[in-house]
Image: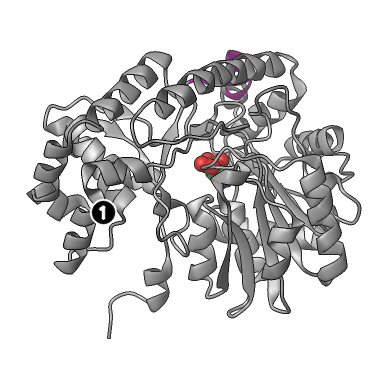
């Protein structure tokens, strides 16, 4: 008998976090690492929100609370989605979760039985594929391409919909690509879903980056289109737009109160409730006009960094980077760099030796980290199925400008270091850490 259940073997991970061990190892060796890996704003949570949480804590609101979320926060969320998307949902359809991540797993477990199909964008947030596989559902990746700035239309989605489709996951603005779906794209997708899907097929719309858009673009949601609110699980939260990753504040607006009750029941089974004093600040984030000022300032800074990093990456030999329209990531194609450094040949040798499943971009990622002190995340970390032959790296620009400049400088140096790569590919480090 095996120690652990078979399903654990199907549970994926988020390499932006697992890379933390590699970074610590490098730091222990005396290296200084520039961390492009984690998608966490380098801004602090706003003082007006910190004050609300600490005052609530001082006032003793530190016990259990409603597992669906405290009513004032759920009302603030309902009001927020009404103002921003025209979705008319009362607080009985809102469930508060610790960050935006849990409701991905909640949705997959709620709607998809074993053998049911779940469509999700790829490259996309790794937790989609992880939960789909863990639940025994059938993963159906929707390939996104740089030629289309990582957007897609109903024509791309249509062939993936079938009798067994239960859930379609959308994410705009997108992690890791920065791709954004336009109002027209979403109108077409909504039309397709109305025409082709049974009413019980659900859309999971991950809108965690709703505030982070560039070039004057405004956020668009599938839930604003006819027939969609009654099919859409609309998910968002405070981690990215309000720079509150460690607070663990997220939410989902469900199509019906009955479905919200299921999410609430999963909350009860998993963690009982999100701390009430944090939720009070969560409500203030939507209600206090000071929040919009802080968000605008941060997004303008991300845009400034984007405007610097994209041309800078494109100057590195073998690197081709599209211009993201939202979120805070650059997602360059590094296949030219892999070719230049001899990564493809080294990766083939590596596999011949039966040493792990690393991709060429994965080897490049570890070379950049262990030899040049730059932490990035490779393409296969954002949905492995169907990712073969695609060599990209994700760089989070939620980092200070100085670090961004130095980090890109190090990548440019690495691009001239074929000898260093050859040494790395033969080293114990590659053996131990290319996974
Ligand atoms: N969805 C997407 C697309 C993300 O990029 C992230 C975080 O990186 C999450 C959900 C999870 O957000 P949270 O930290 O609020 O759980």
Where is residue 215? Give x, y as percent. Answer: 68, 23
For the point 54% across and 38% down, the residue is 248
Instruction: Locate ligand 1 by image quadrant.
Output: top right
The residue carrying mark 1 is: 344
Q: Position of residue 409 (x, y in %)?
A: 30, 21
Q: Quadrant of the rendered structure where residue 256 is? A: bottom right
Q: Is residue 169 above or below residue 280?
A: below
Q: What is the number of callouts on the image?
A: 1
The one nearer the camera, 75 or 41, is 41
Q: Nearer the viewer, residue 82 or 285?
A: 82
Say what secondary structure mark 1 lies in. Answer: helix
Image-based side of 339 in relation to 155, left or right: left
Image quadrant in which you'd find residue 309: top left
Magenta portion: prevailing SS class: helix
Q: Which residues are magenta?
A: 43-53
Q: Is residue 50 magenta?
A: yes
Residue at the (83%, 35%) spot, across then down: 79
Label 1 CA crowd tier, 10 Å (few <14, some 14–19, many 20+): some
Is 59 part of what is drawn in magenta? no
Does mark 1's beta carbon lie closer than 8 Å to ligand 1?
no
Q: Position of residue 157 (x, y in %)?
A: 70, 61
Residue at point 82%, 55% (across, down): 190
């Amino acid at each position: 008998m095996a120690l652990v259940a078979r399903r654990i073997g199907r549970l994926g991970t988020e390499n932006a976090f697992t890379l933390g061990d590699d970074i610590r190892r490098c730091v222990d060796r005396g290296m200084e690492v520039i961390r492009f890996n984690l998608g966490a704003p380098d801004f602090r949570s706003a003082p007006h929100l910190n004050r609300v949480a600490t005052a609530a804590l001082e006032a003793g609101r530190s016990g259990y609370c409603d597992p669906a979320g405290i009513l004032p926060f759920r009302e603030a969320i309902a009001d927020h989605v009404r103002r921003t998307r025209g979705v008319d949902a009362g607080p009985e359809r809102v469930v508060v979760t610790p960050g935006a991540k849990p409701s991905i797993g909640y949705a997959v477990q709620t709607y998809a039985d074993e053998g049911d199909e779940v469509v999700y964008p790829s490259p996309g947030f790794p937790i989609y594929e992880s939960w789909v596989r863990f639940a025994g559902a059938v993963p159906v990746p929707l390939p996104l391409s740089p030629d289309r700035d990582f957007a897609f239309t109903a024509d791309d989605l249509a062939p993936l919909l079938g009798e067994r489709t239960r859930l379609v996951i959308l994410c705009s603005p997108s992690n890791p690509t920065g791709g954004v779906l336009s109002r027209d794209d979403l109108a077409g997708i909504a039309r397709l879903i109305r025409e082709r899907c049974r009413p019980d097929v659900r859309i999971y719309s991950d809108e965690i980056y709703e505030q982070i858009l560039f070039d004057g673009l405004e956020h668009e949601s599938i839930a604003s289109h006819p027939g969609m609110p009654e099919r859409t699980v609309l998910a968002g939260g405070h981690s990215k737009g309000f720079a509150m990753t460690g607070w663990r504040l997220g939410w989902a607006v469900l199509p019906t109160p009955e479905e919200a009750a299921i999410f609430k029941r999963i909350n009860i089974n998993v963690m009982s409730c999100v701390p009430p004093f944090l939720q009070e600040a969560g409500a203030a984030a939507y209600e206090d006009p000071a929040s919009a000022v802080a968000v605008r300032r941060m997004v303008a800074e991300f845009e400034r960094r984007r405007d610097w990093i994209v041309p800078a990456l494109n100057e590195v030999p073998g690197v081709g980077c599209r211009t993201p329209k939202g979120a805070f990531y650059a997602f360059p194609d590094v296949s030219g760099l892999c070719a230049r450094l001899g990564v493809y040949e080294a990766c083939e040798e590596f596999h011949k030796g039966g040493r792990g499943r690393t991709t060429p971009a994965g080897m490049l990622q570890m070379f950049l980290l262990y030899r040049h002190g730059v932490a990035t995340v490779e393409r296969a970390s954002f949905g492995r199925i169907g990712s073969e032959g695609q060599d990209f790296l994700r760089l989070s620009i939620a980092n200070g400008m100085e670090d961004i400049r130095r980090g890109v400088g190090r990548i440019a140096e690495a691009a001239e270091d074929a000898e260093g790569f050859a040494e790395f590919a033969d080293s114990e480090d590659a053996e131990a850490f290319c996974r």
